[in-house]
């Protein structure tokens, strides 16, 4: 069966739109995760050194603590 030249662009547009929406959703997910990490860092930075020590954290270790799931230990 020969592709219909009038429907092929419609199908390609549909595929393109679907992929675009999927990629946008993934990007929004990454943005949300990054924003959550930034908020966590800000929350920890707002604590006193004594509060961090009670959590067994040093201020210099906050980024490693927040991103520990992305690094090999």
Image: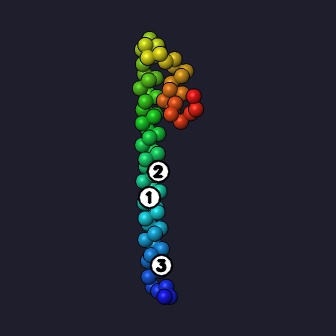
Vertical placement of residue 65 versus 10, above or below: above
Marks 3/1 in contact by CB < 8 Å: the verdict is no
Q: Residues within 10 Å of mark 2 (few under 14, many from 20)?
A: few
Residue, x 42% and y 53% (percent of image)? 25
Q: Distance between the residues labelled 3 and 1?
A: 20 Å
Please give the residue where the numbered disc 3 appears in the rendered image. 9
Q: Distance between the residues labelled 2 and 1?
A: 9 Å
Q: How crowded is mark 3: few (under 14 residues within 10 Å), some or many (20 or more)?
A: few
Residue, x 51% and y 17% (percent of image)? 58
Please give the residue where the numbered disc 2 appears in the rendered image. 27
Residue, x 50% and y 26% (percent of image)? 65
Q: Secondary structure under badge 2?
A: helix
Vertical placement of residue 18 versus 54, above or below: below
The mark nearer the N terminus, 2 or 1, is: 1
Q: Residue 22 carries which label?
A: 1
Marks 2/1 in contact by CB < 8 Å: the verdict is no
Q: How crowded is mark 1: few (under 14 residues within 10 Å), some or many (20 or more)?
A: few
Quadrant of the image containing the C terminus = top right
The mark nearer the N terminus, 3 or 1, is: 3
Whether residue 11 is visible here, answered yes or no, is yes
Marks 3/2 in contact by CB < 8 Å: the verdict is no
Q: Distance between the residues labelled 3 and 2?
A: 26 Å
Residue 69 drawn at (x, y percent): 50, 34
Whether residue 63 is visible here, answered yes or no, is no
Nearest to the observer: residue 26 or residue 43: 26
- Residue furthest to the right in view is 72
Q: Secondary structure under badge 3?
A: helix
Residue 37 drawn at (x, y percent): 45, 34
Vertical placement of residue 32 versus 66, above or below: below
Residue, x 41% and y 26% (percent of image)? 43
Q: Secondary structure under badge 1?
A: helix
């Amino acid at each position: 069966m020969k592709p219909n030249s009038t429907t092929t662009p419609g199908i390609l547009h549909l595929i393109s739109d679907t992929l675009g929406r999927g990629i946008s959703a993934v990007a929004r997910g990454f943005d949300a995760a990054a924003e959550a990490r930034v908020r966590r860092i800000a929350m920890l930075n707002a604590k006193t050194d004594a509060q961090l020590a009670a959590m067994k954290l040093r201020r210099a270790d906050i980024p490693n603590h927040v991103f520990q799931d992305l690094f090999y230990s």
